[in-house]
Amino acid sequence: MSFHFSRTPVATAPVATTYRRIATPLPVPESLPLLDELAAVETRAMHGQMPIVWDRAKDFQVWDRWGNCWIDFTSTIFVANAGHANDHVLAALRRAVDAELLHSYNYPTEIRARYLTALVAALPDHVDKAYLMSTGTEATEAAFRLMRIHGQCRGKGPGVIAFDGSYHGRTLGAALMSGSAASRDWIRYEDPHVHRFAFPFGADDDNVDWRAVFHAELEALAARGVDPARDISGMMLESYIGWAAAFFPRAYVEAAAAFAREHDILLAFDEVQAGFGRTGRLFAFQHYDVAPDLICCGKGIGSGFPLSALVGRGEILDLPETGILSSTHSANPLGCAAGLATLEEFERHDLVAAAERKGRRLLDRLRALQGRFPDHVDRVNGRGLVAALIFRDPRTGAPDGDTPSRICEEAMRRGVLLVHTGRESIKFGPPLTIDEAAIDEGMDVLAGIMADICGRSGGP
């Protein structure tokens, strides 16, 4: 990220509403010693977020120690789907701590059995087994491994199809599949058996034959000497491109799924950011009406407790020998307690339906902003409670990465937290529990900021 948030305190207009409170300059002058302390002892790679010190987060609001309160449109990073510090999840964690079993490695526990049974029951019918881990990148890494193991068992080559612009994590296999060359540069090696297709932007364009677009990619692969039917073991799709909240065209995914099914190629979806209600479906792949072999889960699965899972067809997950798939904190008792409580909250409050309903309100407000500022906002992407405004330079039409950063910084000063991507987008991903009135208030704030920064060329 080339943009750096200012560490110089700026006097702000006081804010005091139902959902927001800004009472100090930002960043808070008293917070600067703590920011300096972190800079002295922590890798700079962990820094770069807005200079506010979180003290408490509840439901869809975030507080600091100095009385400031923000409406949160980030869910930290799409984690707090069931709301920050969800009461039911907190109670489950307290019971788990009081049980005096913080770790069990791979030894069986009752909470592990209860959670896995509930998790599999909540998933689509074709999914019957799960493997628990701690982070999303572990899930995508495991999927990468299983795709190649399955292909090896079938006498196929090790090829895996991934997509430009995608992001699957920071470990080696996950990074090799990711679609940004810059994110892979540190490896100093490109796996010749990872084949990247161009992401098919333009899902709403009905004038494109998306099935033909997919098959053209296969033909281009064959022209490079790769037999897609023989040399490919799996395909990894990020359910939507993260930075842009851009979804695949449905017909494109249908063509990919049909090709995979015809040639015994595993179809995997990276749902780490998209899963657990975020898009108005339990999983984003359900918008495409396909049945993937493997589904990578994380973030919202544990409501903030480190938890992830690879779920899918049992015959695939059972390919490795006993003990081959495990990690130190797999199926941690506390993680299982948080995961089970999260599932119960989703069912109790029908959070998937809530995301779909509230998402329509969010997207309507964002499209209205596009109508007001058509020279600056190129498009609006999203479904459910994930969305993005994509910005362009009104003079050149080129992607504009500066304006979104300035908007995010000013929104922070006015009591709204937005997802800063560091490029030509602003993302929105509030907890699924957010009040609709808070959505409206946050959008009103955003509209005022855009009027100040982008000008009023779009009208009142």
Image (cartoon, rainbow, N blue to C red):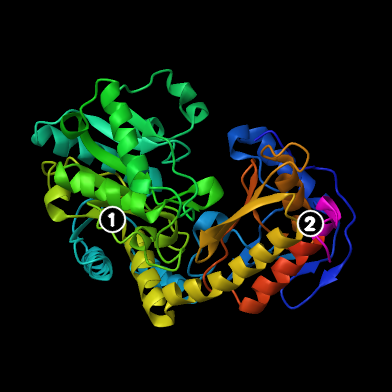
Q: Is residue 458 magenta?
A: yes
Label ID, residue 450: 2
* Crowd band around label 1 with a 10 angstrom C-alpha radius: few (<14), some (14–19), many (20+): many
| Image height of 150 relative to 404, above or below | above
Residue at horizontal 72%, vertical 52%? 408
Magenta highlight range: 449-460
Between the residue at mark 1 and the residue at mark 2, the CA separation in whole angstroms equals: 45 Å
Residue at horizontal 54%, vertical 54%? 77
How many numbered discs? 2
Q: Quadrant of the C terminus?
A: bottom right
Residue receiving disc 1: 331
Q: Is residue 177 among what the camera can see? A: yes
Front label number (1 vs 2): 2
Residue type of the residue flagged with mark 2? Met
Left or right: 230 as drawn, with respect to 98: left
Q: Say which element carries label 1.
A: loop
| Image height of 293 relative to 219, above or below | below
| Image height of 70 relative to 268, above or below | below
Of residues 236 and 254, which is closer to you in this image?
254
Q: Is residue 133 among what the camera can see? A: no
Left or right: 13 as drawn, with respect to 272: right
Give the x, y percent position of residue 66: 78, 62
Residue type of the residue flagged with mark 1? Ala
